[in-house]
Amino acid sequence: MPDDVGMTAAVQLFPTCIGDVVAQQTATDAERVLDALGIDHHRPSATTCCGQPAYNSGHDGPARAVAKATLKALDDGSDLPILVPSGSCTSMVRLHWRELFHGTPEAEAATRIARRVRELSSYLAEHTDALRELKPSLAVRVGYHDSCHMLRELRIKEAPREVLQTVAGLELVELDSSERCCGFGGTFSGRYPDVSVAMADTKIDDMVAAKIDVLVSSDPGCLMQLAGRMSRQGTPVRAVHLATLMAEALA
């Protein structure tokens, strides 16, 4: 899709179950950014979870049962990009649904959807010229956290940084721990809470040493983990989704 987007551009936005239940602001801010770019968008009705928690725990049957409703909602017969403001959920749908639904009546639909799914920052990075024309501005010192699924499975690293660099006044600081796991890992944090907290604490120590104002990521799960731990420690660093920071800069 060209960089000079207009109202002819259109996408679907799959907010994910975290976006529906815990991080509603992330989906709302993603819509605000798309609105600023003049990109038509809509949220498919009846989406729930992509099935990742059950799938990662080895429960393929329950994962399919959960994901089937989302699959039906996304398979609308169009070829519109499906934007997902979550690296881990993007990875699940784009890379693992084909295996999850292999040999089932939903196999072809899973393949169709996988081809359409895009992680949000990778889509926005294709429109950096249009973003700059909107003159986003925010005087803030930012560190970026690369989520495991997004970095290691989707191989997306530069795209969110390119989006952040469209913001005048923003100083992007490369954290020593930017590629280190936050310790969330979905069910991992529940099974191994002590290890999970220790992993989060090492990242928080790095943020404090780097003297950043805001930690940005493209994965709500990571942000939930790190923001929760920072609130308990009283760490004076905000943790926000890329969409939220961009919406603030465009405001």
Image (tube, rainbow, N blue to C red):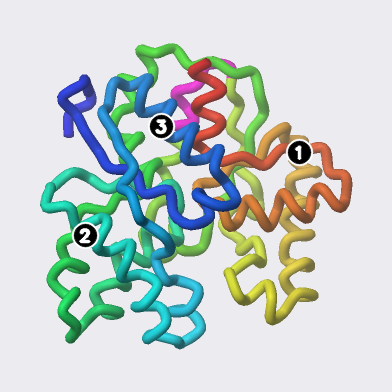
Q: Quadrant of residue 240?
A: top right
Q: CA distance from mark 1 to mark 2?
A: 37 Å
Q: Is residue 141 magenta-colored?
A: no
Q: Which mark is residue 31?
A: 3
Q: CA distance from mark 2 to mark 3?
A: 21 Å
Q: Residue at x 17, y 34 (%)?
A: 1
Residue type at the position of mark 1: Val
Q: Secondary structure at mark 2?
A: helix
Instruction: Give the residue pinned by disc 2.
Output: 113
Query: Is residue 61 placed above or below 76 in the rendered structure?
Result: below
Tell me, yes or no, whether the two marked residues, 1 and 3, touch with CB atoms within 8 Å.
no
Q: CA distance from mark 1 to mark 3?
A: 25 Å
Instruction: Name the side, left or right, on which 6 lies relative to 168.
Output: left
Instruction: Give the residue pinned by disc 1.
Output: 237
How many residues crowd around disc 2 within 10 Å: few (fewer than 14), some, or many (20 or more)? many
Residue type at the position of mark 2: Ile
Q: Residue at x 56, y 30 (%)?
A: 245
Q: Secondary structure at mark 3?
A: helix
